[in-house]
């Protein structure tokens, strides 16, 4: 193994993180298309919104009976991630409205 190569475990976790970041960005953008924000936001908000929404959506989906560990890269995973991001976006709007 050369100095620049990662171990198999490290490479696996780098791939997992990149999948969640990429997939989270898509889910966050999908949620913002469905329910756009009234004020302009940067590129980090859909990314963070999507990643958090992916985690929440897939966690809720895994709590159903017969729940198995879900892969975010699937049609059901995408719908759950987008629904989670959509929920966070609604929650943000409610909190922002009462400020």
Image (cartoon, rainbow, N blue to C red):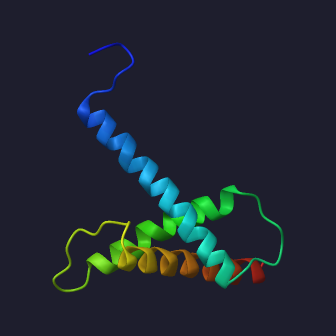
Question: Percent position (x, y) of residue 13?
Answer: 33, 42
Question: Percent position (x, y) of residue 81?
Answer: 46, 73
Residue ID at (51%, 62%): 24
Residue 98 appearing in the image? no
Q: Is residue 63 left or right of residue 38?
A: left
Q: Is residue 50 left or right of residue 58?
A: right
Residue ID at (45%, 68%): 54
Q: In the rendered image, which quarter is residue 7 located in?
A: top left
Residue 71 appearing in the image? yes
Residue ID at (76%, 58%): 42
Residue that lies at the very extreme toward the left in this rendered image: 66
Q: In the rendered image, which quarter is residue 74 located in?
A: bottom left
Residue that lies at the very extreme toward the right in this rendered image: 39
Question: Percent position (x, y) of residue 65?
Answer: 18, 86
Q: Is residue 90 left or right of residue 16?
A: right
Question: Percent position (x, y) of residue 92?
Answer: 66, 76
Residue ID at (43%, 54%): 19
């Amino acid at each position: 193994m050369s100095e620049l190569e990662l171990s198999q475990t490290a490479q696996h976790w780098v791939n997992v993180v990149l999948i969640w970041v990429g997939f989270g960005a898509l889910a966050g953008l999908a949620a913002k298309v469905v329910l756009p924000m009234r004020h302009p936001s940067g590129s980090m908000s859909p990314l963070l919104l999507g990643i958090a929404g992916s985690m929440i959506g897939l966690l809720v989906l895994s709590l159903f009976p017969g729940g198995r560990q879900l892969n975010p890269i699937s049609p059901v995973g995408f719908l759950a991630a987008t629904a989670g991001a959509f929920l966070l976006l609604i929650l943000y709007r409610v909190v922002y409205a009462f400020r």
